[in-house]
Amino acid sequence: MPELDVEVAGVELESPFVLASGVWGESGASLARALRAGAAAVVTKSVCLEPRPGYPNPTVVELPIGLVNAMGLPNPGVEAYGEEIAEALKPGKPVIGSIFGRSPSEFCAVAKKMEGFGVHALELNLSCPHVRGAGAELGRSPLLTEKITRAVKGAVEVPVFVKLTPNTASIASLAKAAERGGADGVTAINTIRAMVINLELSRPVLSNEFGGLSGPAIKPVGIRAVYEIFEAVRIPIFGVGGVSSGEDAAEYIMAGARAVQVGTAVYKEREQTFRQLRRHLSRLMTRLGYESIEEMVGRAHGGR
């Protein structure tokens, strides 16, 4: 049997499959449920300094090719999130706290709180495509990406990952900025800015009008992004976007990811998803002759 365990910037994972932020992570109990169902680690919903209600419905549109959502980053504020983290930590697997803010000082304040709650690492959400003054509006700037990353790295001891936006001319330049800021790793990609029109009403379906496209439709974009980032930086990469099979995960890993995050795939088959992915990847690795994840990382680059 091939070895599926892998280490990403000091975070030890029993397999490369991690629950992505925003799906099946509504509470500490649901995060713990994902871990008991086979996720190697979980990334929390994105949390900010003050409570945020998010957008009114409709916030999600299901399409044959994936999902378009604009939740508006709803969360109870970091002060109220300690109990959720405590619940998520009970299965004894890594918990990665996703955070966002509107300035370096706000990021630092949330990061310190989350570290104090006991998370194993932080993921900076610099890539949400539909919240004004946060997410991709900050993360499209290499200068701000570097500045925010450096500020958070100076404020905490746990590993810091930066989740990058694909809604940019060069995601590799953002990865370089994160690396210059001291990031321990990057996550690529977040959703792609998108819209769905209701023909009967002649109006956008989502209350926010614009949302983010996730799922199978964006997998080739994610693979390309990870491939470009692997060529540009030396820090490890979480691949994310349309992973629903062992083959999908293997593509990301051969492009350069050390592990993958899974989001839209758990939207329909939550309890079965992670164990199925592990079985699929294990069978594929056996067929292709790989004995470990490490052997596969970056193989599409011809030997780096």
Image: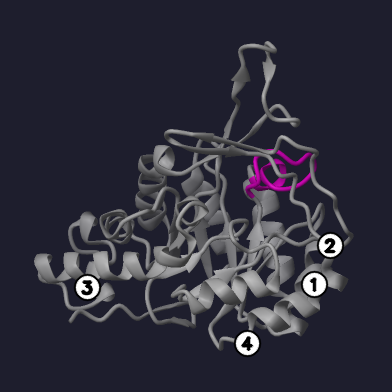
Going from N to C along the chain, the mark reached first, 1 or 3, is 1
The residue range painted magenta reads 127-139
**Label 2 environment density (alpha carbons within 10 Å; few <14, some 14–19, many ≥20):** some
Q: Amino acid at mark 4?
A: Lys
The nearer-to-camera label among 4 and 3 is 4
CA gap, disc 4 to disc 1?
15 Å
Identified at 75% across, 37% down, the residue is 57
Q: Amino acid at mark 1?
A: Tyr
Q: Main SS type for the magenta part?
A: loop
Q: Is residue 50 above or below residue 3?
A: above
Task: Name the residue that disc number 2 marks.
Answer: 76
Label 4 close to label 3 by CB (< 8 Å): no
Q: Residue 106 in the image: x percent, y percent?
A: 84, 62
| Mark 4 neighbour density, 10 Å: few (under 14) some (14–19) many (20 or more) | some
Amino acid type, label 2? Pro
Query: What amino acid type is highlighted by mark number 3?
Result: Glu
Which secondary structure lies at badge 1? loop
Mark 3 closeness class: few <14, some 14–19, many ≥20 residues within 10 Å: few
- The numbered mark at residue 90 is 4
Q: Residue at x 80, y 38 (%)?
A: 56
Quarter of the image where one finds residue 239:
bottom left
Find the distance from the CA under tag 1 to the CA under tag 2. Answer: 7 Å
Residue corresponding to mark 1: 81
N-terminal-most mark, 4 or 1: 1
Report which residue position mark 3 lands on: 295
Q: Residue at x 53, y 84 (%)?
A: 93
Q: CA distance from mark 4 to mark 3?
A: 32 Å
- Which callout, 2 or 3, points to the residue nearer the camera? 2
